[in-house]
Image (cartoon, grey):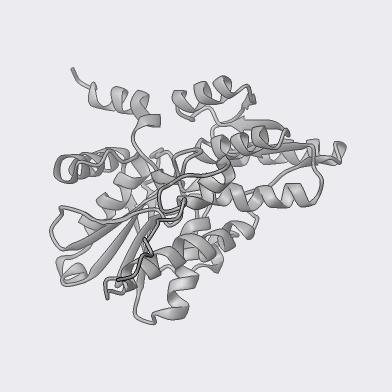
Amino acid sequence: MSNIVYQKSSKELHVFQNVIDLLKGMWPTPLVKLNLPGNIWAKLEYYNPFSRSIKDRTAYYLFQEALEKGSKEIIESSSGNFAIAISILSILYNMKATIYLPETSAEETRLLLKFLGINVVVNGKSTIESLPLIEEYVKKKKDAYHPNQFYNLTNVRAHMETTAKEIDEQLSSINLKPDIIIAGIGTGGHITGISRYMKAKYKDVKIVGVLPAEYETIPGIRRQRIGDYIVKSSDVDKVIEVTLEESIKGMQEVARTSGLLVGISSGATVAALNKLEREEKEDKIIVLIFPDDIFKYISILKSQLLKGE
């Protein structure tokens, strides 16, 4: 009998020498089957350690560009998760960070950035409104770097090389392939990366994008056209609009059936799933992208759930 004893690696046991290794060591994030009718799977992106969101991936890739340029300051416009992720990376690499937040950003996000000691500027009703101010600032300060997650195609590459590849490998490990993938459209990074990867490999896969209904504000997703800069390179088969109320009901459905406390944009994908016709999703392998968890949205939930009381 062999005396060799199998020993797990430190990564398998989740022991990491530094927090950057922790970030990459948590990839792949879990893929789990939900307790919902049908063959519904969820990609749990709140297992990313910095912002507890899918934005850790984008931030990591874009931050590498700042390091390559020898930048001393990061400046960006974000409504929440990307702001937290890029701010934590700036702390780790001793780089100054300035974040422009829209007035509609969650109170929890502002508090977290203040807690981290980040310079925060609250401006406008949307993240896009601050871009001209940032561009003007960067022109004057040559050592400042603007990742510009809204127009930087590295955002797409991050999700082709990580998120999409992980989903493919995870499903393949149990002899499945995706029929439908449902994802929110925010900057367009993860839905575009996923669509480009999956469409290149599976000709029949359908990509469903989720947008806020007109006059609705849903953290993490925003109204835009499929022709907008990053999203125009995606191959989205269908776009479904949902309301904030429908998104919160989607969160509740997941919590009360599967015990997962997911975020509002995650609930939006569930709302979109529920709007698909029965014949569209019957006997299909469906993957929902859950970008983050519930805890940064308590103030929004409180205002919504207490309405009319």
Total numbered labels placed on residues in the image: 0
- The residue that appears at 69% across and 32% down in the rendered structure is 97
Picture coordinates of residue 121, whole percent (x, y): 64, 25
Q: Residue at x 20, y 41 (%)?
A: 259
Position of 61 relative to 217 (above/below): below
Q: Nearer the viewer, residue 24 or 122?
A: 24
Q: Along the horizontal axis of the image, is 89 left or right of 176?
A: right
Residue 10 lies, in percent from the top left, at 46, 50
Q: Which quadrant would residue 127 be assigned to in this image?
A: top right
Task: Find residue 203 and report its image quarter.
Answer: bottom left
Question: Percent position (x, y) of residue 207?
Answer: 37, 67
Of residues 114 and 103, the one drawn nearer to the viewer in this rendering:
114
Q: Position of residue 221 (x, y in %)?
A: 44, 46
- The residue lying furthest to the bottom in this view is 203
Instruction: Tell me if I can see residue 16 in this picture.
Output: yes
- Residue furthest out toward the top: 309
Residue located 52% across and 65% down the image: 160
Please identify the quadrant where the N terminus is shown. Answer: bottom left
Residue 143 lies left or right of residue 126; in this view the side is right
- Residue that appears at 48% across and 30% down: 104
Q: Which quadrant does the C terminus fall into?
A: top left
Residue 150 visible? The answer is no
Query: Which residue is nearer to you in this view: 276 or 292?
Result: 292
Q: Report whether 135 appears left or right of 282.
A: right
User: Where is 6 relative to 271, above or below?
Assistant: below
